Amino acid sequence: MEVRRPGLQTTVQDAGRQVRALGVPAGGAADPVARRLGNALVGNAGGAAGLEVTLGGPTLVFHGAALVSLCGAPFDAQLDGEPFPLWRAVAVRAGQTLRVGGTPVGARAFLAVRGGLDLPEVFGSRSTDLRGGFGGLEGRALRAGDLLTVGAAAPLTPRRAFVAPDLHTPLGPEQVLRVTATPDLTGPLAAALLGRAFPVGAQADRMGVRLEGPVATPQDPGRVSVPNVPGMVQLPPDGRPILLLPDAGTHGGYPTPLVVIRADLPRLGQLRPGDRVTFRTVPLPDARAALHAQERALRQAEGSLRAWSGPALYAGRHAD
């Protein structure tokens, strides 16, 4: 594939890294549901590397035949000027041009290609770490003129398979995120954070999403740095909460009173400036039940989609 237009921020992403103990962020696609189902549509394993599209997409010229899917936010996409359907596997001929425009809702989509993108692994992943400058294509977003190599794969004729809408990551300007409390959640912080709609500010990237609306934040000069995970709600000194995303650092010293449950993490990757976020606490058993239900539905869909595509293709170390 040749990049004619890179889009606002298009990066190579996969299932991410598993070396947080070394201080390396997990990374990976910000909407893992779109990644897994997009890969399943083209016969890849869920962790295969593809392109993460953000707000405005790229223009790609295919120099060889390919089987492609685009899953996530409803980006306007055209193949040689004709509408390109989302959430389906589409055969692309050599010489054709795929143009991905913008999206009216949500922020990201995952473009999967049968065989996956063939790039060197760094710490067991092909994902791009923009802040660290490694992984993907030279550790950066795509540029015009870049060439991307696709892994070898047997040809596969696309069938009329599609992904049921109830499996898609929920999109929309109003998002209710389920969270669990940490020991940092005091009574005053609970009153300030819960049941209140926070607008998503302009500072939103793969490291985190900053929310508008100050919260009185307790300051403790003696507080030690503690481990961070995606989904944590950080409270910096300015009082504007930060929702951590996949590229966030592995440790931090700010209070983290809330953690978004794992089943709702894909929603964080779809937040865009102007959206509004409300936090709702749930007990740990409910969080686990939600994750189990989501995982069961995803695995069933992946299994059904791969039933007609043969063994899943992936050259990496882990599938998800």
Image (tube, grey):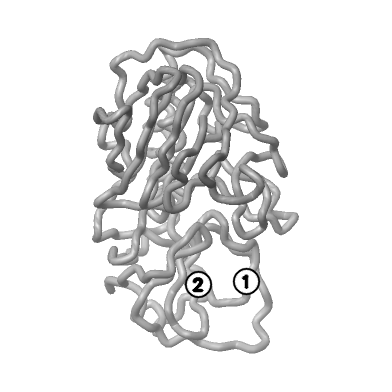
Residue 287 versus residue 307 in the image, above or below: below
Q: Residues within 10 Å of mark 2 (few under 14, many from 20)?
A: many
Q: Is residue 44 left or right of residue 292?
A: right
Q: Quadrant of residue 78?
A: top left
The image position of residue 237, as x and y in percent, is: 51, 85
Tell me, yes or no, if residue 116 can be seen here.
Answer: yes
Q: Residue furthest right?
A: 22
Q: Give, as a three-letter code, the residue at label 2.
A: Gln
Secondary structure beneath label 1: strand
The quadrant the C terminus occupies is: top right
Depth check: give the residue in front, 5 or 120: 5
In the image, what residue occupies the spot 32% across and 28% down? 79
Q: Residues within 10 Å of mark 1 (few under 14, many from 20)?
A: some
In the image, what residue occupies the spot 53% across and 47% down? 143
Tell me, yes or no, if residue 264 can be seen here.
Answer: no
Depth check: give the residue in front, 297 or 99: 99
In the image, what residue occupies the spot 47% across and 85% down? 238
The image position of residue 22, as x and y in percent, is: 75, 55
Whether the residues at callouts 1 and 2 have beta carbons within 8 Å, the answer is yes
**Numbered mark located on residue 252 in the image:** 1
Residue 40 versus residue 212 in the image, above or below: above
In the image, what residue occupies the spot 54% across and 40% down? 145
The image position of residue 147, as x and y in percent, is: 57, 34
Q: Is residue 138 left or right of residue 303?
A: right
Q: Is residue 237 left or right of residue 85?
A: right
Q: Give, as a three-letter code, the residue at label 1.
A: Gly
